[in-house]
Amino acid sequence: MHPEIHVGPVVVQSFGVCFAVGFLACGALAARRLAEIGKPRDWAYESIFAALVGGLVGARLDYVIENWSTAHRDLLGSLFSGSGLVWYGGVIGGTIGVLVWAWRRDFLGLALLDYAAPLLALGYAVGRIGCQVSGDGDYGIASKLPWAMAYPHGTKPIDTTVQPTPIYETITMGLVALALWRLRDRFRPGLLFAIWLVLSGLERVLVEIIRRNHPVVAGLTVPQLFSLGLTAVGIVWLARADVRKASTLPAQG
């Protein structure tokens, strides 16, 4: 594990590098998609920047709320610390940021949701690489599997071999991102986003079974409860929708 990368006198956080790579990758994919649907390519980086700012604010606020017992002792320090970014808070904050941007650009609607679906999956997949290389504690329960590993030099070190759940999530959500991209012109507006809701929700529900988070209700963790809600919304959306091709054109690879 390499939480920090030393480049001469400069110390770079490996998670920050992956964070930046994720947004750049999403920006490149977004620019291609916007060109396909006849929108300015510059909107890609505007929307990614809106998601970045909103996501950082949301992730920090979520972290402070979840860790209030310790965070309130140094509230400003907790708010502006470089560590402790919570995914779901980031999603909510990023969503608000993008919605404000889309409102200003008159791009609110189902097309916006479908535009965002593969980007969300790709960003998540790359972000989990950052969790893996930094050893930030997002690993799973103890395991004796051949590929289980310890994180003795991680941000949150552990010597016991555990399930490398960030790797599982990177692979899974990378495949989801690929599938969503290949399906981007197959359905009526909004359904690609509904599929993302189902797949991303199921992925998190399942991986939480071998994660180290503590259950809060009926044996389920907070991420599982949130993910079940996303999955349910996606399933209802798909069940009530007319799942037909948006056009007769072949899907683009």
Image (cartoon, rainbow, N blue to C red):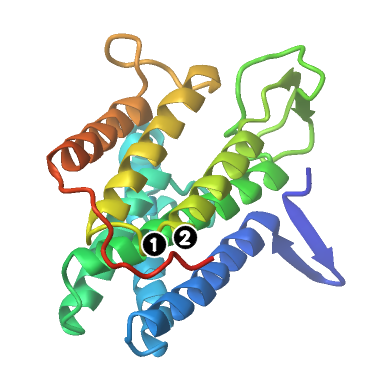
The x, y position of residue 156, in whole percent, is 65, 34
**SS for dot 1:** loop
Choose top left, top right, bottom left or bottom right for residue 35: bottom left
The residue lying at 60 percent from left, 33 percent from top is 137
Quadrant, the N terminus: top right
In the rendered view, does 1 fall on the left or right side of 213?
Answer: right
- The image's mark for residue 181 is 2
Figure check: 217 above or below 108: above
Q: CA distance from mark 1 to mark 2?
A: 5 Å
Of 137 and 223, nearer the camera is: 223
Figure check: 244 above or below 32: above
- The image's mark for residue 184 is 1
- Residue furthest left as drawn: 240
Quadrant, the C terminus: bottom right
The residue lying at 32 percent from left, 55 percent from top is 58
Marks 1 and 2 in Cβ contact (< 8 Å):
yes
**SS for dot 2:** helix
The x, y position of residue 102, in whole percent, is 22, 76
